[in-house]
Image: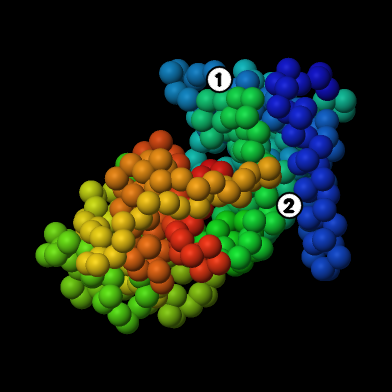
Amino acid sequence: MADPAYPAAHAVAPVVHAHFAQHIADARARGERGLAEPPDEATIAALIDAAFWASLRREESYVPRISLALLAPAQAEHPLMFERPLPLEPTALVRLSPAVERAGIHLGVARDGDRLAVWGTVRVIPPYSLVVEVAAPGLIVIKHHRGEEGGKYINVAVLEGDQIKVVDERASTQPDCPSLVESLLGEFDAVNPLVQLAVSMRAHGRGGSLLVVPAGTDRWLDSIVRPISYAVTPGFDELAQLFRAGPERRRPWRDAVGRSVEAIAGLTAVDGATVMTTSYEVLAFGAKIVRRKGAPQVDQVTVTEPIEGGAALLVHPSQLGGTRHLSAAQFVQDQQDALALVASQDGRFTVFAWSACEAMVHAHRVEALLM
């Protein structure tokens, strides 16, 4: 294999190799079977390099969306195999991109003699298979999943140009870490509706806010302008009913959850905030947040991002984005048992939660986990 021309591919390969080697060894120790083999550093760098250069090209003016999965055809379920494997190089990847841009389809890559080659397409891959995805021009995401059908992939690192962000799995052990962030880091069950809602909110690209308030109380109304333009009566409880009846984890149930999540995420695109209870019942959307009567104005929040080398910062909430972020921080300061999820139009995503340890609002920047 030729040496990668993208320097970040070389720089991140040892870290990615160590991640996969450790997780696969741990899974084997737990008795799990059917696992992928740990990728070597040269292979990791080659996949990242090919994906990066392909991301900078166009196919009939379209930006390529490509997902590369490292596995042999024999490891795949129902693979689509080419008669002749194609070289792992940008031109071939871009030409194939229109056929595989839908979510859940990967180009299978394996060694063919002394080179890496694309042998076909695949949907179901072994747990802990290396996946390298083109998310946008110059934006590459390295990920894997743990074998749960339909579960979100776990991001290992994000590369954007010469910037490398390696996800810090230890961030989930920090005090007051919200369960949503823990799930994104792979610590909890992947069937988490807040994770799915966050992914869908970010995907619609319009920006939006989702307030998650305790079920069975209306204290949150003290922080909302009334009357609410789009109050929902009775509460929309389709998602709540699905989780009360399950989770069954069978495909019809997962598909129904997905449709309900898409419907709720769509509400967040309307100006104002969507309000949902902790039992997943939607109470309102387009709600305008106001400072609770007698409460102080929020003037400082702690900001962290779950990446290695990241440091906590104290900032004014308006520095995180604008009015939507400021109002979400104010809401959580006033309603300390609530959670606020805020998607920006540029892809940034922030989870606001009250930290009892810090006695202030904590803003968790998690877009590196959602790509």
Q: Which of 82 and 331 is in front in this view?
A: 331
Please, what secondary structure does the residue beneath circle 2 have? loop
Q: Mark 2 points at which residue?
A: 128
The vertical placement of 137 against 175, above or below, is above
- Rendered residue at 51%/45% (across/down): 367
Q: As shown in the figure, which amino acid type bears the numbered disc 1?
A: Leu
Give neighbour class at mark 2: few <14, some 14-19, many 20+ (Cα, 10 Å). many
Please indicate, yes or no, whether residue 245 appears anywhere in the rendered image.
yes
Name the spot of residue 266 as percent of width and height, x first: 31, 52
Please indicate, yes or no, whether residue 261 appears anywhere in the rendered image.
no
> Does residue 300 appear to the left or right of 6 in the view shown?
left
Name the spot of residue 58 as percent of width and height, x first: 50, 19
Name the spot of residue 212 as percent of width and height, x first: 37, 66
The vertical placement of 182 against 18, above or below, is below
Query: In the rendered image, which quarter contains the N terminus?
Result: top right
Task: State the image quarter where residue 321 is shown.
Answer: top left
- Rendered residue at 79%/58% (across/down): 34
* Rendering colour mode: rainbow
User: Number of callouts in the render?
Assistant: 2
* Mark sitting earlier along the chain (1/2): 1
Q: Mark 1 points at which residue?
A: 56
> Does residue 333 appear to the left or right of 308 in the view shown?
left
Q: Nearer the viewer, residue 217 or 58?
A: 217
The vertical placement of 311 against 178, above or below, is above
> Does residue 118 appear to the left or right of 325 in the view shown?
right
Q: Farthest residue toward the left?
A: 227
Q: As shown in the figure, which amino acid type bears the numbered disc 2?
A: Tyr
Please, what secondary structure does the residue beneath circle 1 have? loop
Task: State the image quarter where residue 32 is shown.
Answer: bottom right
- Rendered residue at 46%/69% (across/down): 253
